[in-house]
Image: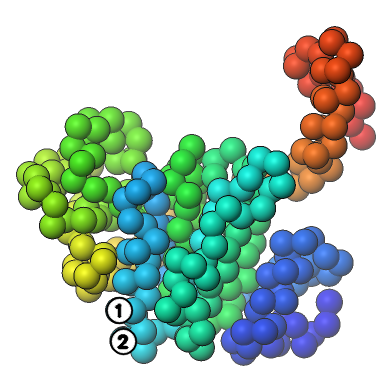
Amino acid sequence: MSPAYINGLLEGHIKTLARCISLVENEAEGYEQLLEQLPAATNTRVVGITGPPGAGKSTLVNALISELLAQQKKVAIIAVDPSSPFNFGALLGDRIRMSQHFNNPDVFIRSMASRGALGGLSPKVIEVSDVICAAGFDYLFIETVGVGQSEVEIAGIADSTVVVVVPEAGDEIQTMKAGLMEIADVFVVNKADRANADEFVKNLRLLAHTRQTDSWEIPVVKTVATQEQGVHDLIEALQKHQSQLRGSNVRKSILMAEKAYQLIQHRRMRNVNKRALQEEITGLLNNGNFNLYQFIRNFFLHQP
């Protein structure tokens, strides 16, 4: 790995950053050495944005970018798009969703296909986020597809997790106790100009209060992302949460253990090719003698 790559990355050169991300995503020769040379700590605040589809996550991220640019901050975004099960490519595109910021030199946007990851996050998100943090951004937002277990996964990657919901989710608020309530550091009720928003916010705050700890009570922030309302309050809540985190080795060790687990899991699965599996299964299905569990047992028997 050329020293020019790591030097350019640490100096914040955008073209070098893009090349380094491509090296990591494609697992090109020398990418592991690049990762091993990354700084142990950065000042980048990593924020996960998750929640159900239709909550306005992309619009909210767009509004956050505008507010932070006004504060003269450098912002990076990883937009994790759902993958097509047929070609494993991203179905959505960051250039469409955040086109007004795409050419701003203080904004870096990268789409990543989930590539069939069951949780909805690309298995490369951890490594790519660490590469981006090394480039000196003030904030890194990771926006998930909002399906499957991506909410849980993002909580193991981000310093702060923002769960975005809408007033219409009122009927589902009890279900949140066992789901999103467990991983939210900040709740955002987006589209808060809609009917019943105030009642929903009140009930959500009552639920959040039940999860209060000695150091943190989950705030509930009202936003109308299309009009950039409430975005400043959200940034203040994030800054407060990040300040509370500093010096907390317990939270940091939990995050690092989760990252280590996911990276070890991914590397042990490195030789498992989903396309090859599909081709082999297709042949067995055509022969009419396919049994999923026999296939799995035989697969592991033949693994090196």
Q: Is residue 82 left or right of residue 230?
A: right
| Contact between labelled residues 2 and 1, with CB atoms less than 8 Å apart | yes
Q: CA distance from mark 1 to mark 2?
A: 5 Å
Three-letter amino acid code at disc 2?
Ala
Percent position of residue 156, x then y: 49, 50
Q: Nearer the viewer, residue 172 or 96?
A: 96
Percent position of residue 107, x then y: 48, 80
Q: Secondary structure at mark 1?
A: helix
Q: Examine the rendered structure and indicate whether residue 175 appears above or below residue 237.
A: above
Q: Which mark is residue 70?
A: 2
What residue is at 36 percent from the left and 89 percent from the top? 72
Dot 2: few (<14), some (14–19), or many (≥20) neighbours within 10 Å? few
Percent position of residue 240, x then y: 26, 68
Q: Is residue 201 left or right of residue 260?
A: left
What residue is at 52 percent from the left and 70 percent from the top? 95
Residue 34: name its quadrant.
Answer: bottom right
Q: Nearer the viewer, residue 256 or 62?
A: 62
Q: Which mark is residue 282?
A: none
What residue is at 56 percent from the left and 48 percent from the top? 82
Quadrant where the N terminus is found in the figure: bottom right
Percent position of residue 135, x then y: 58, 80
Disc 1 designates what residue? 67
Q: Examine the rendered structure and indicate whether residue 148 appears above or below residue 167.
A: above
Three-letter amino acid code at disc 1?
Glu
